[in-house]
Amino acid sequence: MRSIFSPLAAGDFRRYYLGQTASAFGDSLTPLAIAFAVLHLTGSPVDLGIVVLSTRLPVILLTLLGGAIGDRFARRTVMLLADLARFAAHGVTAVLLLTGTAQIWMLVVLQLVAGAGSAFFNPAAVGLIASLAGKEQLQAANSLISISRSTTSMLALGVAGALVALVGPGWAVLIDALTFLVSVAFLYRLPRALAAERPQAARGLLASVAGGLAEVGRRPWLSVWIVHVALTNALVISPILVLGPYVADQHLGGAPAWSAIGIAYAVGGLAGGLLSARWRPARPMVAAVLVFLLMAPLPALLALPAAVWQLAIAGVAAGLQLVVHNVIQTTAIQQHLPEEFVARASSVGMLGGIVAAPLGMALAGPAAATFGTGPVLLTSAAVAVLGTVSTLLVPAVWRIRHDGSSAANPDTPGTNEDTARAGDLSNGDTIPAKDSSIRS
């Protein structure tokens, strides 16, 4: 059996991995730092909500476009430009905070720029990994990236808290900005061949977006998967994130209890990365959907509420399922879709999760006020089970195999949309753009 570190033997993937590990550490510093920066400036939860929304809004609006660009142009180039934009946004933010000249509107504008960079970076990254690691190492490579994210998240949360308390949030944001330069340095060292532009498509970008949506739509296994992600983000995970802190504050002793559950969740994510690096389920769709059942105990125990140690165990299970699900999902997209559609298909899945999450968060509070926190959380646990069972009833879920084949009614190979289907729509600009974390 190969070592879980075997993808690192490929020098190009190793460079990418080191850059993204540094960047992931910085990404975990910023949310806490920005939150306390806003609270220090105005103390207004409304202002905090506006700034947080400004980080998500560009991702919601631009992710599909980012997927189209990631499939149309050199992914290395797209990612370099996106990282440079995020470096600039976070660097200016840090300077404003450190000099005491920041205002809320400035933070909103800069977070909009940073969010736009993420919308273009993330879909392209999914496609680039296949080029760097090779088809045989895809799942191990995705697992290693998940492991680094879980590990850096645990480390960064403690560092961010210390920096905010001792020297102020501006220093945490500055460190994040510098990690984007680290990522740029490693991306720049990737092979020049990856910088070569792809052949220019005959159709416009919006038509490419529509082509990506159509490619997802013609694969029932992928469409069902995206619906499952959106449903569970809205009705299972979002209520936990909104009501979990409330339960901890009211019944479990406050922030330390919720922090302990969060750390357990990160530990579970680390374990999930180790597991997914070695586990090769014969039917990956079935495995990824089934593993979501590990999420059900957490909302059910919060509804009681159970003891912190019991909730921590449930948190480990929830974190494990998240990483295993995401690794298997990403690998399946990379293996089963034509290479020229990978970024766009990934962007559709991301958009489904990103849009569903804030909708679920917005509904969780009013629902709890109307029906009670316990009933809402129990409903979330029930949805986790019923949604999983319903998804497994779809035959297409059972057809996808780990080896890249389909057990029955295989997807027909993708054609070049810009040649075989160029006559379908002559003007890409006439195609309306269509509006995907927690899970993606």
Image (cartoon, rainbow, N blue to C red):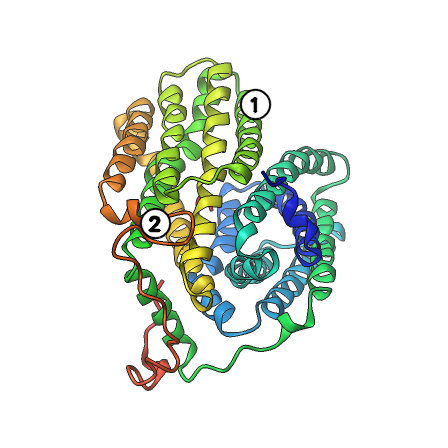
- The residue nearer to you, when weighing 46 against 192, is 192
Instruction: Report x, y in % for residue 365.
Output: 35, 35
What is the distance, in whole Å, between disc 2 and disc 1 at their CAs? 38 Å
Q: Secondary structure at mark 2?
A: loop
Please name the residue that numbered disc 2 is placed on: 400
Mark 2 residue crowding within 10 angstroms, few (<14) / some (14–19) / many (20+): many
Q: Amino acid at mark 2?
A: Ile
Instruction: Report x, y in % for residue 315.
Output: 48, 26
- Which quarter of the picture shows residue 321? top left
Q: Can residue 96 be seen at all in this image of the molecule? A: no
Q: Can residue 165 be seen at all in this image of the molecule? A: yes
- Residue drawn at 40 percent across, 82 percent down: 203
| Left or right for 169, reference 35 | right
| Quarter the N terminus occupies | top right
Quick check: 25 above or below 188?
Answer: above
Q: Amino acid at mark 1?
A: Ala
| Left or right for 165, reference 313 | right
Instruction: State the residue lying farthest toward the front.
Output: 1
Instruction: Report x, y in % for residue 132.
Output: 61, 59
- The residue nearer to you, when weighing 24 against 277, is 277
Mark 1 residue crowding within 10 angstroms, few (<14) / some (14–19) / many (20+): some
- Residue drawn at 67 percent across, 47 percent down: 21
- The residue nearer to you, when weighing 60 against 270, is 270
Please name the residue that numbered disc 1 is placed on: 260
Q: Secondary structure at mark 1?
A: helix
Quick check: 171 above or below 412?
Answer: above
